[in-house]
Amino acid sequence: MTIEGPKNDLLLLLRHVQYRHQGEDRQFLIFTDFDVDFEDHTGFTGAISRIPATRDDIEDRIRGTMRDMERGE
């Protein structure tokens, strides 16, 4: 038995915001412990970039984001 809730929720979110693999101006930072292949609304299929969902990776990414915000990026 496999629980598919988190993966299905992520796919629903990507569809809702009409995420595109190509030509996407927005950057999504997705912390997961699983790979996600997604077919966007243009019909292009590809893997979603992800960040390992470990404490260290999450802390590093948050620190980097805070530094970027301080610099106005």
Image: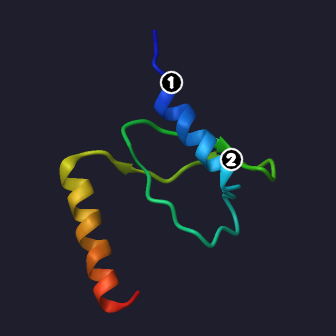
Mark 2 or mark 1, which has the lower sequence index? 1
Q: Report helix, strand or loop for mark 2.
A: helix
Image quadrant in which you'd find residue 38? top right
**Image location (x, y in percent) of residue 55:** 19, 49
Q: Which residue is mark 1?
A: 4
Colour scheme of the picture: rainbow
Image quadrant in which you'd find residue 34? top left
Gap in Å between the C-alphas at discs 2 and 1?
Answer: 16 Å
Q: Report helix, strand or loop for mark 1.
A: loop
Amino acid at circle 1: Glu
Would residue 46 appear left or right of 40 to someone viewing this image?
left
Would residue 7 appear left or right of 60 to someone viewing this image?
right
**Image location (x, y in percent) of residue 30:** 44, 52
**Image location (x, y in percent) of residue 22:** 69, 63
Q: Is residue 37 visible?
A: no
Q: Is residue 8 above or below residue 44?
A: above
Residue at the image point whose x is 26% and y is 55% from the top: 58
Amino acid at circle 2: Arg
Q: Determine crowd level at label 2: few under 14, some 14-19, many 20+ residues with C-alpha closer than 10 A.
A: some
Q: Quadrant of the C terminus?
A: bottom left
Residue at the image point whose x is 54% and y is 41% from the top: 10
- Residue 39 is marked as none
Residue at the image point whose x is 27% and y is 76% from the top: 66
Q: Is residue 54 above or below residue 57?
A: above
Q: Is residue 57 visible?
A: yes
Q: Which residue is mark 2?
A: 15
Q: Is residue 60 above or below residue 42?
A: below
